[in-house]
Image (cartoon, rainbow, N blue to C red):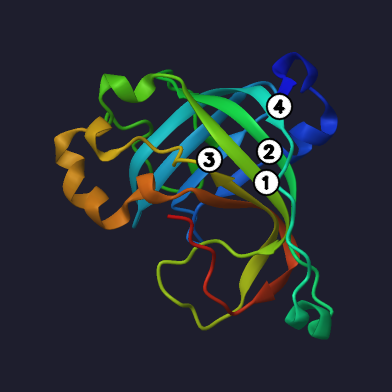
């Protein structure tokens, strides 16, 4: 394990500092900037459920897990297996300030709705693994047209979204349908390639 004082290098930030998509409709998205700021949104059908800035930092780096050897089908299809390239513990905190959200700028919005209780604003640590390959975002239903592939996939040990009990009661009915707090798998860095396939699901 590497201390956080040794982690501020360009290669680590190049992987972590991205816009991370939790679904193909861009409803659940978070952004990590190199200066320790960020944003997190959750929306459904033009309704912004969560739109807040973030603060974040690297706590520690870990050895990434070892990728399994190529399978026979990988060898036959000359297919490259996804490779874990980063494992880290990071701290993220949703904050109460209200700057303009860049992730939601192209949609009608009541910026920063008051939908969280106070405990949702506490800092939290997350164990994250970033894998390089070709991934699609999770889709709520199978789409029959090509969807974009992404070069990076981040898997977290728990969702960056607050659990149900940290949302105000009026949101619970909608959240039972959208369930952003179940999402632990996000993708970043869109490629020029597409595919028709169900995306990753990390529950």
Q: Which residue lies at the image location 60% right of the left edge and 24% below the top edge?
A: 37
Verify CB contact (< 8 Å) between mark 4 and mark 2: no
Could you say which quadrant of the image residue 3 lies in? top right
Whichever of labels 2 and 3 marks the residue nearer the N terminus, that label is 3
Question: Which label sits in the foreground, 1 or 3?
Answer: 1
Whichever of labels 1 and 3 marks the residue nearer the N terminus, that label is 3
Q: Considering the numbered disc 1 on the image, is that residue within a helix, a strand or a loop? A: strand
* Residues at marks 4 and 2, CA–CA distance in whole angstroms: 17 Å
Verify CB contact (< 8 Å) between mark 2 and mark 3: no
Q: Quick one: label 1, few (<14), some, or many (20+) residues within 10 Å?
A: many
Whichever of labels 1 and 4 marks the residue nearer the N terminus, that label is 4
Residue named by callout 2: 87
* Residues at marks 1 and 3, CA–CA distance in whole angstroms: 15 Å
Residue named by callout 1: 130
User: On residue 30, which mark appears?
Assistant: 3
Residue 105 is at least partly visible in this image: no
Verify CB contact (< 8 Å) between mark 1 and mark 4: no
Verify CB contact (< 8 Å) between mark 1 and mark 2: yes
Q: Quick one: label 4, few (<14), some, or many (20+) residues within 10 Å?
A: some
Q: Residue furthest top?
A: 5
* Residues at marks 1 and 2, CA–CA distance in whole angstroms: 6 Å
Whichever of labels 4 and 2 marks the residue nearer the N terminus, that label is 4
Q: Considering the numbered disc 3 on the image, is that residue within a helix, a strand or a loop? A: strand
């Amino acid at each position: 394990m590497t201390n956080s004082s040794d982690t501020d290098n360009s290669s680590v930030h190049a992987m972590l500092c991205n816009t991370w998509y939790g679904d193909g409709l861009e409803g659940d998205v978070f952004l990590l900037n190199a200066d320790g700021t960020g944003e997190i949104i959750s929306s459904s059908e033009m309704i912004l459920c969560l739109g807040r800035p973030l603060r974040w930092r690297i706590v520690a780096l870990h050895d990434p897990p070892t990728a399994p050897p190529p399978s026979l089908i990988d060898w036959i299809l000359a297919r490259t297996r996804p490779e874990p390239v980063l494992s880290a513990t990071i701290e993220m905190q949703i904050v109460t300030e209200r700057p303009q959200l860049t992730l939601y700028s192209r949609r009608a919005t009541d910026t920063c709705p008051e939908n969280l209780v106070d405990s949702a604003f506490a800092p939290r640590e997350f164990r994250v693994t970033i894998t390089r390959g070709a991934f699609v975002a999770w889709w709520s239903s199978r789409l029959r047209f090509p969807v974009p592939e992404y070069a990076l996939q981040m898997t977290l040990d728990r969702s960056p979204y607050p659990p149900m009990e940290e949302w105000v009661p009026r949101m619970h009915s909608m959240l039972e349908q959208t369930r952003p707090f179940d999402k632990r798998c996000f993708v970043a860095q869109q490629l020029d390639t597409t595919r028709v396939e169900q995306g990753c699901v990390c529950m």
